[in-house]
Image (tube, grey):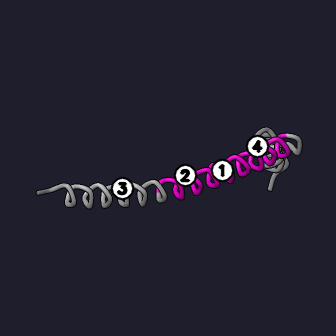
């Protein structure tokens, strides 16, 4: 390889290295991303807990509604001539 070819290869490698450095996430940026992920996980856990609580409440209300419908039907049968 000629001196010029080696110089061209070197310049291309330097450009690629600069490009890689420009696109790398810095350690500080990574810490921010990591913190955001942890906070998001906490929020998701709270939402999941609330959803489970709401599901239990809906199940209970559904059962009560069925029981009340049955009671109303029984009352209607008793009142029917």
What's the distance in space between the residues labelled 4 and 3, CA to CA?
47 Å
Provide residue 30's location: percent of width, then percent of height.
82, 46
What residue lies at 53% left-to-right and 54% top-to-bottom? 57
Provide residue 16's location: percent of width, then percent of height.
76, 45
Q: Earlier in the sequence, mark 1 or mark 3?
A: 1
Residue 22 highlighted magenta (yes or no) = no
| Quadrant position of residue 63 | bottom left
The reply to whether dot 4 and dot 3 touch (C-beta < 8 Å) is: no
Q: Viewer-nearest of labels 2 and 4?
A: 2
Q: Viewer-nearest of labels 4 and 1?
A: 1
What residue lies at 75% left-to-right and 41% top-to-bottom? 23
Quarter of the image containing the C terminus? bottom left
Residue 35 horizontal side relative to residue 53, left or right: right
The reply to whether dot 2 and dot 3 touch (C-beta < 8 Å) is: no
**Front-most of 71 and 56?**
71
The reply to whether dot 1 and dot 3 touch (C-beta < 8 Å) is: no
Crowdedness near tag 4: few (<14), some (14–19) or many (≥20) residues, C-alpha within 10 Å? few
Instruction: Name the secondary structure under disc 2.
Output: helix
Residue 34 highlighted magenta (yes or no) = yes
What residue lies at 52% left-to-right and 56% top-to-bottom? 55
Residue 6 horizontal side relative to residue 70, left or right: right
What's the distance in space between the residues labelled 1 and 2, CA to CA?
15 Å
Q: Which residue is mark 4?
A: 36
Point out the stretch of residues depicted in magenta: 29-58
**Front-most of 64 and 59?**
64
Q: Which residue is mark 1?
A: 44
**Front-most of 54 and 28?**
54
Crowdedness near tag 2: few (<14), some (14–19) or many (≥20) residues, C-alpha within 10 Å? few
Q: Which residue is mark 3?
A: 68
Q: Which residue is mark 2?
A: 54
Provide residue 80's location: percent of width, then percent of height.
14, 56
Outermost residue toward the left? 81
């Amino acid at each position: 390889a000629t001196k010029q070819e080696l110089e061209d290869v070197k310049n291309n490698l330097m450009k690629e290295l600069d490009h890689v450095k420009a696109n790398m996430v810095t350690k500080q940026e990574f810490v921010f991303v990591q913190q955001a992920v942890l906070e998001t996980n906490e929020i998701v856990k709270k939402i999941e807990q609330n959803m489970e609580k709401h599901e239990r409440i809906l199940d209970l209300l559904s059962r009560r509604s069925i029981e009340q419908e049955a009671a109303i039907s029984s009352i209607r049968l008793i009142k029917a001539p």
